[in-house]
Image (cartoon, rainbow, N blue to C red):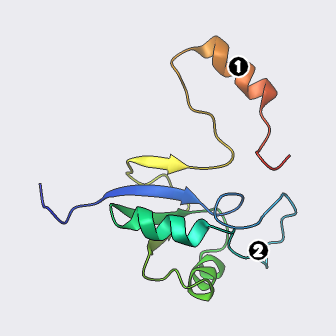
Amino acid sequence: MDKNFKRTILIDLDGVLNTYTGNFDKNYIPPIKFGAKKFLIELSREFKIKLFTTRNKELAVQWIFDEGLENIISDVTNTKDLNYLLIDDRCICFDGNYANLKTQIKNFKPWYK
């Protein structure tokens, strides 16, 4: 394997990297969350980072530049591209047990609620 190869991590925008708390505005992306830039810089040393969002791609790219992340985040996607890991505030990690999964779905709340 190429020694420069980095596994890809998809990271959700709203609720993970920015200060979004559920008040969606299609024309505005809230500012970066405290600690997120440092986290991304550290992560980018070992991984290729793609922004994973359903938002307008042009707006998301502008947010990346406004926050000074253009050398850290390699791309913006709204598809589940080949990846090592997906980080999202609205997901459940499947543990192989459908009964547990059903309970987790019924009880799910994003971290900010």
Q: Residue at x 76, y 74 (%)?
A: 30
Residue 32 in sight in this render: yes
User: Which badge, 2 or 1, comes first in the chain's sequence?
Assistant: 2
Amino acid at the residue labelled 1: Lys
Instruction: Give the number of the disc on residue 102.
Output: 1
Amino acid at the residue labelled 2: Pro
Say above or below: 101 vs 75. Answer: above
| Quadrant the N terminus occupies | bottom left
Q: CA distance from mark 2 to mark 1?
A: 32 Å
Q: Residue at x 56, y 87 (%)?
A: 65
| Residue 95 in the figure: left or right of residue 110 | left
Q: Residue at x 62, y 87 (%)?
A: 66
Can you tell which of label 2 and label 1 is closer to the viewer?
2
| Residue 64 in the figure: left or right of residue 70 | right
Instruction: Give the number of the disc on residue 27.
Output: none
Q: Please provide percent x and percent y for residue 110.
A: 77, 44
Say above or below: 96 vs 10. Answer: above
Query: Could you say which is closer to the camera, residue 18 or residue 97?
Result: 18
Q: Badge 2: how crowded within 10 Å, few (<14), some, or many (20+)? A: some
Query: Could you say which is closer to the camera, residue 53 or residue 30?
Result: 30
Kindly state the secondary structure of the residue where label 2 is placed.
Answer: loop
Kindly state the secondary structure of the residue where label 1 is placed.
Answer: helix
Instruction: Give the number of the disc on residue 30.
Output: 2
| Residue 110 in the figure: left or right of residue 98 | right
Q: Please provide percent x and percent y for residue 79.
A: 51, 56
Residue 49 in sight in this render: no
Q: Residue at x 54, y 58 (%)?
A: 11
